[in-house]
Amino acid sequence: ANFFNDLIMPGSWGACMDVGWRFAGSLSGGMNMLGNAGGALAPMIAPFVLTHGGSWTVNFWIFAAVYLVGAICWLFIDPVTPLDDAPAAHS
């Protein structure tokens, strides 16, 4: 799992720079925050599923579905169009 996670990370950060442009730091921070929120919720969801009649197989399919939804969401990212079309202001 870590191998495939690390395999996608350069593309994720690159997309943040392409889409975020001058807001790349904010966009990267938001992406990182939401990713860590999922990582914080997963240890709470797994025991809940196990205590309510689920199994490790059910947990696996739940987390696989979350990854699939994430992969589908990436299909809608347009790295060519930045969030802000205006040029950066120089002070």
Image (cartoon, rainbow, N blue to C red):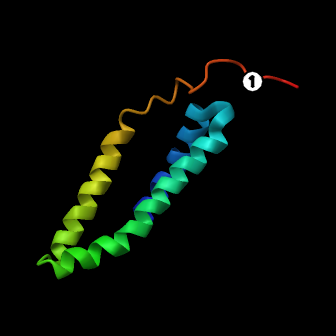
Which quarter of the rendered picture does the C terminus lie within?
Answer: top right
Which quarter of the rendered picture does the N terminus lie within?
Answer: bottom left
Residue, disc 1: 88
Left or right for 81, reference 55: right
Tell me the residue at 61%/38% (across/down): 17
Callout 1: SS: loop
Tell me the residue at 55%/48% (across/down): 30
| Residue 80 horizontal/vertical position (percent) | 52, 25
Do we see residue 1 in this rendering?
no
Q: Residue 66 sits in which quadrant?
A: bottom left
Residues 88 and 71: in front is 88
Tell me the residue at 64%/39% (across/down): 24
Left or right for 30, reference 2: right
Q: Amino acid at mark 1?
A: Ala
Residues 66 and 12: in front is 66
* Number of marks: 1
Outermost right residue: 91
Left or right for 84, reference 43: right
Mark 1 is surrounded, within 10 Å at the Cα level, by few (under 14), some (14 to 19) or many (20 or more) other residues, namely few
| Residue 2 horizontal/vertical position (percent) | 43, 68
Residue 13 lies, with reference to residue 88, above or below; the image says: below
Do we see residue 49 in this rendering?
yes
Residue 78 lies, with reference to residue 36, above or below; the image says: above
Outermost bottom residue: 51
